[in-house]
Amino acid sequence: MPSFAPKLGRLVSMSARFAEKLRRFAEVAVRVGVGLQPGQKLYVNANIEALPLTRMVVEEAYKAGSRLVVTQLYDEQLTLARYRHAPRDSFQEYAAFLVDARLKALDEGYAWLSIVSDDPEILRGQDPELIRLASQTAARFSKPFSDRISGFATNWCIIGAASLRWAALVFPGEPPEQQVERLWEAIFAVSRVDQADPVAAWMVHTENLERRVQQLNARRYAALRFRGPDTDLRVGLAEGHLWAGGAGRAQNGARCVPNMPTEEVFTTPHRERVEGWVRSTKPLSLHGNLLEGIRVRFEQGQVVEAHADQGQEILQHLLDTDEGARRLGEVALVPHSSPISSSGLLFYETLYDENAASHIALGASYDECLQGGHDLTLEQKRAAGANDSLIHIDWMIGSEYMDVDGITPTGLAEPLMRKGEWVD
């Protein structure tokens, strides 16, 4: 759909109201999401579709006192060209020097911002085996960087930007200009940009999430039990687990909101104490493909049966990534009344859809969700029940029909959620 790109440019430049919302979004991303510190450098990784927002982010970063902003743009069409024309035996190759540059940026104290604007179906119809090889290769080479980012080696954030192909999937049947405009308005709304003082609104919101975190940490549950349609799942929690949510504190002391939007509180499951069946409640966009109707069964923490109504081969390749790919690294609780869920939209982007529903993640755990996690060895983390893997893939299991209980160390079940809402 390249012929619509000029129309998108006119949409951005013609509307003063839109430009002001975009500027406010950039300001919130820099000041609240990244939590950029005066004098700090910033690294921005962005889809080329997000160029108008990227320009405003750079401007807001300098206004916030950044000494230097470095941008790296990527284009999914270039990735698609590789799948169509590159030699099959080249898909286990990777430009490792790019990871080295990112690691050096962390060493030099750069903050990090990612702006995603990806087509959820960019690789639809491509060879699943090539997708497997490329994704596993990228994950293997990128792991040193992703581990440091998830470990809050610096202050960081991920935000989204509307694009033509993404908007067409969310709002089918409408003219392209209206599709993009509606997706932008939805992003602004769930990111609190349309409120009178977005920065203040985010401060209130993160404080509310942090209160929920404190309540859950005080309970010291041994497990969670999820019950709903096609779901009866018990998720044991790691020894010394910690709940997190809202803002986080980077190792440099900066306060940041890693995902914007965010509505979740989350913690570390025990890698060997997950039992039962669970079914996804929303599609998962993964490696340029959509997976729908995921249903898996766990025994002793491991996926032993897995089905998908759409994307079965992609799901199987995911589970075969490594030993940790069949175990959980995260469990998160999100009320059904969250702004993303209340919008009634399916975003086809995990950054948004995971904040519409409670979810679980296959793969690696987060150090911040384990007592002393940043200082523990891999063996010590595993002994506590944390998981390690090349992947971390969230998929949604919550709905207005889901009940969640907290299981105390003595086996008592306490209601946490009923019909998808918190029990207070």
Image (cartoon, rainbow, N blue to C red):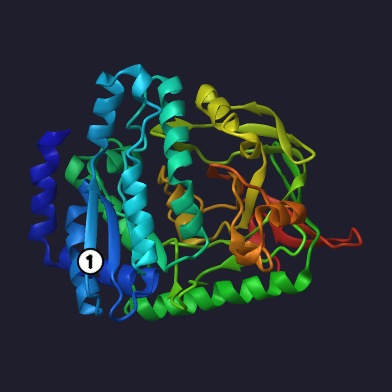
Q: Nearer the viewer, residue 15 or 209?
A: 209
Quadrant holding the C terminus: bottom right
Q: Nearer the viewer, residue 313 or 254?
A: 254
Residue 189 percent coordinates (x, y): 35, 63
* 31 horizontally vs 242: left or right: left
Q: Nearer the viewer, residue 151 or 198?
A: 151
**Residue 303 visible in the displayed image:** yes
Residue 343 percent coordinates (x, y): 43, 55
Residue in view at x 23 percent, y 40 percent: 75
Q: Quadrant of residue 18?
A: bottom left
* 374 horizontally vs 277: left or right: left
Residue 79 percent coordinates (x, y): 28, 33
**Residue 237 visible in the displayed image:** no
Q: Quadrant of residue 44?
A: bottom left
Q: Which residue is mark 1?
A: 69
Residue in view at x 24 percent, y 80 percent: 65
Residue, far right: 410
Amino acid type of the residue that numbered disc 1 sits on in the rendered structure: Val
Secondary structure beneath dot 1 equals strand
Q: Nearer the viewer, residue 290 or 252?
A: 252
Bin the neighbour count of mark 1 within 10 Å (Cα to Cα): few under 14, some 14-19, many 20 and up.
Answer: some
Depicted 266 relative to depicted 180: above or below = below
Residue in view at x 37 percent, y 26 percent: 91
Depicted 333 relative to depicted 247: above or below = above
Depicted 258 relative to depicted 280: above or below = below
Quadrant holding the N terminus: top left
Residue 133 percent coordinates (x, y): 44, 27
Residue in view at x 29 percent, y 67 percent: 42
